[in-house]
Amino acid sequence: MSETKIPYKIYLTEEEMPKAWYSMRADMKNKPAPLLNPGTGEPLKAEELAPIFCEELVKQELDDNTAFFEIPAEIRDFYKMYRPSPLVRAYCLEEKLQTPAKIYYKFEGNNTSGSHKLNSAIAQAYYAKKQGLKGVTTETGAGQWGTALSMACSYFDLDCKVYMVKVSYEQKPFRREVMRTYGASVVPSPSDTTEVGKKILAEHPGTTGSLGCAISEAVEVATKNEGYRYVLGSVLNQVLLHQSVIGLETKAALDKYGIKPDIIIGCAGGGSNLGGLIAPFMGEKLRGEADYRIIAVEPASCPSFTRGVFAYDFCDTGMICPLAKMYTLGSGFIPSPNHAGGLRFHGMSTILSQLYHDGLMEARSVDQLSVFQAAEQFARVEGILPAPESSHAIRAAIDEAIKCKETGEEKTIVFGLTGTGYFDLVAYEKFHNGEMTDEIPTDEQLAASIAKLPKIG
């Protein structure tokens, strides 16, 4: 097909939207290791997870063999308010870079939450409502997940309690106010409102918090209050399943024009957007039908893939959650208070960890200054102010496009633009004022944290 016939934005029709989520686990030869009960060291059973998660979500979490899960009609109808999202050809960026590479990005910021998080938030709220619950609790880093969940809970008339990482609570007050607009209560974490929060504050006075801390508080509140369950915006198998709508739409849009990507890039914190974006492509790779270079990009300040270890660890700092086998820096690791908010998690999805361990994808870490340089460059030529998290993928996409310029290779690059950065202007201000720093952990710091991993297997 002629190059000129490919539009700037490729849209699917409502009829072409996915009607089922896709699970990569069904096609994985080496399945992700099971979650373990921290008390017994044995694989968790559904009845043990039921007090924490919604019943239907527990089934999705533990199912290693079902490839497709039907998306309920109520969720599909909600999706139609902001989906299908556009796949955009970055013609202007290509021209600016003078690269022979063809660059596409899947834009997930076209909703009030400003990110892809709403794809799973509405699903989890739906199952909570269907179960007859009063409400849910959660944590949030930069605030996209908390915002998305508050929107979803408002839609289904559910109570929503959000524990927001303290540094983000202070850096992003407007994100906090959006959550409150949708009826959520927002607490900076760690807080003195929970037992685990008090314990963390006693051990780390003045801490700016982490996702691991906030998870501990949210789980404690959910399990101590009748009619509540805990929901999570990343890491879990169920979340990657819901986010597969991103990759399914991306592949359908590319297939419309006979386009096959060479490189697929996503930012990686816990794994939700990366796992969602790569799902159908990784499925083809696992089944031997096609091959792709898949690159996970993480912050140098929280390098789970690139400097972590593949081992069982707690998903939370308070060590009250199940154990997951993943690439981890240790549940006690608290990253520097940088602006990659949603990527400041000590571990990684068990699915993505296994795929990375098996050599099916790559990973790289990038420093904060280079990320914001890429963000600014992208904003100036493509007209979208990207979120700091998304900008990690932009950094890698630009780097790969420059390599194509140097080698003359005409590769097709697809990356996930997970959201917008309009609530991240404090970060942009610090970058423009030359006040931005990046604290990268030393080998000694990581070794000390990793040494405290639970002795499992």
Image (cartoon, grey):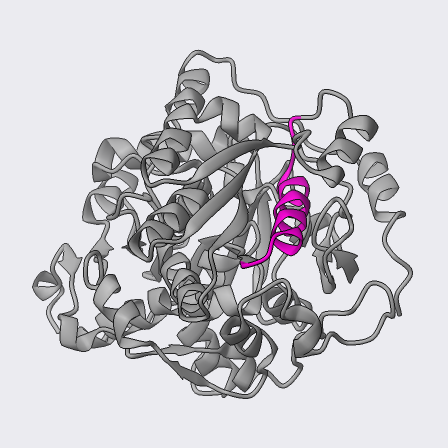
Identify the residue at horizontal 43%, vertical 30% (top origin).
372
Q: Is residue 45 left or right of residue 343?
A: right
**Farthest front residue in view:** 226
Count of numbered badges drawn on the protein: 0
Q: Say which quadrant the N terminus sits in.
A: bottom left
Whether residue 346 appears in magenta in the rendering, the answer is no
Name the side, left or right, on which 298 lies relative to 128.
right
Query: What residue span does the magenta drawing correspond to?
Result: 208-227
The image quarter containing residue 81 is bottom left
Q: Where is residue 204 in the image (x, y as percent from the top left)?
A: 78, 27
* Residue 154 position within the rendered picture, expressed as x and y whole percent measured from the top left: 33, 49
Q: Residue at x 66, y 27 (%)?
A: 439
Q: 440 or 206: nearer the eye?
A: 206
Q: Main secondary structure of the magenta part?
A: helix
Q: In this view, does 45 lie to the left or right of 153?
A: right
Please indicate, yes or no, whether residue 399 appears anywhere in the rendered image. Answer: no
Q: Can residue 46 be seen in this view?
A: yes
* In the depicted structure, whether residue 252 falls above or below residue 415: below
Q: In which quarter of the image is the C terminus?
A: bottom right
Question: Residue 231 at x, y = what percent?
Answer: 53, 57
